[in-house]
Image (spheres, coloured by chain):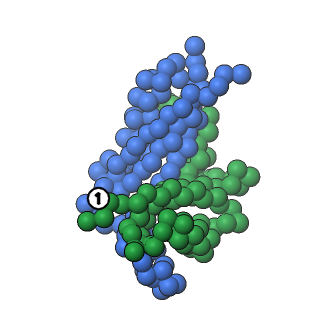
Chain colours: A blue, B green
Amino acid sequence: MAQTYQAQVYVTLRPSVLDPAGTAVRSGLEHMGYDNVSKIRIGKYIEVSLTADSEEAATQQLDRMCDQLLANPVIENYRIELQAMATA
Amino acid sequence: MAQTYQAQVYVTLRPSVLDPAGTAVRSGLEHMGYDNVSKIRIGKYIEVSLTADSEEAATQQLDRMCDQLLANPVIENYRIELQAMATA
């Protein structure tokens, strides 16, 4: 039976890829007096609600969605967390 | 003594605020055949490395940084996670 799942997807730039936005934020913080921040990397945090027959099916679908649309696998990594929601 | 901390900051739109980017992604997924996705919200995931005298000091500073620069408190919520890094 189909079950509702709540997923969190974390999309981060690969370590070898420059993050100009993160560098700009770090520089902004430094100008505001926060001179103890050594590194900032900015990624995406995506909350997804979906229905699927099983946790495996939901994870597989989220993997495909990340590869095709949510992330750019050439420069980004992603990590998926999944919880089944209580059925009504 | 100053200690290095690694923080994760999750910035999400407040539930009452519309998320046009999330809606566009959901619509894109639907056109790709993923018609079982009921909701998508897109936020930011920020990794911060900083030094501070204590966990409390680090958390307080991250709070101020979020209020002033990393998030827009009018339309966004944020959540902070913090780990002390092993000292060399």
Res A67 visible: yes
Residue B83 image-quadrant placement: bottom left
Q: Is residue B18 left or right of residue A61?
A: right
Q: How many marks?
A: 1
Residue under numbered circle 1: A15
Dot 1 amino acid type: Pro
Q: Which chain hosts label 1?
A: A
Q: Quadrant of the N terminus of chain A?
A: top right
Residue A14 vs residue A39, the one in the foreground: A39
Work out whether A35 lies above or below B62. Answer: below
Residue A39 vs residue A42, the one in the foreground: A39
Work out whether B31 lies above or below B21. Answer: above
Q: Quadrant of the C terminus of chain A?
A: top right
Q: Is residue A60 left or right of residue B18?
A: left
Residue A85 vs residue A68, the one in the foreground: A85
Give how far across and how far down residue B42 sits, in percent. 56, 51
Residue A60 image-quadrant placement: top left
Q: Residue furthest front?
A: B1
Res A37 visible: no
Of helix, strand and loop, which one carries label 1? loop
Residue B61 image-quadrant placement: bottom right
Give how far across and how far down residue B85 sits, in percent. 36, 60
Give how far across and how far down residue A24 sits, in percent. 43, 76
Say which residue appears at 30% left-offset and 55% top-offset: A14
Say which residue appears at 53% left-offset and 71% top-offset: B57
Mark 1 crowd level (few <14, some 14–19, many ≥20, 10 Å Cα): few
Say which residue appears at 51% left-offset and 31% top-offset: B34
Work out whether B61 lies above or below A73. Answer: below
Give how far across and how far down residue A47 sits, in percent. 55, 44
Say which residue appears at 63% left-offset and 53% top-offset: B20
